[in-house]
Amino acid sequence: MSQPFSVVVQQMVETSQKLKLADLQIETLKRSMTHAQLTDKEISQLPTDTKTYESVGRMFVLKEVTEARLNLDNKIKGCEEKVKTLEGTKAYLERSLKESENNIREMIQQRKDANVGDQH
């Protein structure tokens, strides 16, 4: 009885940690999307012949406004896709966590029932 119980508890702990990680990743991606959207909004107000620079690693590369906006749009779309994937993973993890909780409840109930049966 103790062995399966500890396995289920360990699974719950791991699932909870994965849920927290997914939440953090979603939050980071949403923040990145907001940043890209605000940057795109500001760049859209510039004349098309304005020099813009895009960060590439530790340096900046000269880009046309249209190319910079296209890159921002691609970044936003990529973040949206990742968020959708992470939300699907999060939903699966939440179901898994509920299942583990139910398994623990069943084990505890079986243990109580066994103890009651032994006393009679």
Image (spheres, helix red, strand yellow):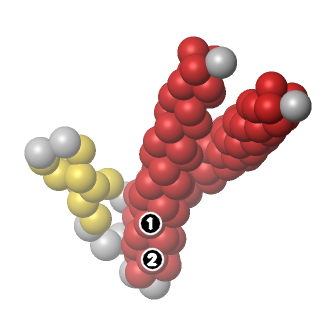
Task: Identify which residue is drawn at 80% across, 32% down.
Answer: 119
Q: Nearer the viewer, residue 63 or 90?
A: 90
> Residue 78's image quarter?
top right
Instruction: Classify mark 2: helix, strand or loop.
Output: helix
| Horizontal and vertical percent position of residue 34 | 48, 70
Q: Quadrant of the N terminus?
A: top right
Q: Are marks 1 and 2 in contact (CB under 8 Å)?
A: no
Query: In this rendering, is residue 67 above or below 113?
Result: below
Task: Identify which residue is drawn at 17% across, 52% down.
Answer: 60
81 to the left or right of 111 = left
Residue 22 visible within the image = no
Which residue position is annotated with label 1?
31
| Horizontal and vertical percent position of residue 37 | 50, 71
| Horizontal and vertical percent position of residue 117 | 86, 29
Residue 30 visible within the image = yes
Amino acid type indicated by mark 1: Arg
Lower sequence index among marks 1 and 2 = 1
- Mark 1: give few (<14), some (14-19) or many (20+) Cα within 10 Å: few
Which residue position is annotated with label 2?
38
Hey, which residue is sitting farthest front in the picture? 120
Query: In this rendering, is residue 43 above or below 118?
Result: below
Query: In this rendering, is residue 102 above or below 118?
Result: below
| Horizontal and vertical percent position of residue 55 | 23, 52
Hey, which residue is sitting farthest bottom in the picture? 45
Q: Quadrant of the C terminus?
A: top right
- Mark 2: give few (<14), some (14-19) or many (20+) Cα within 10 Å: few
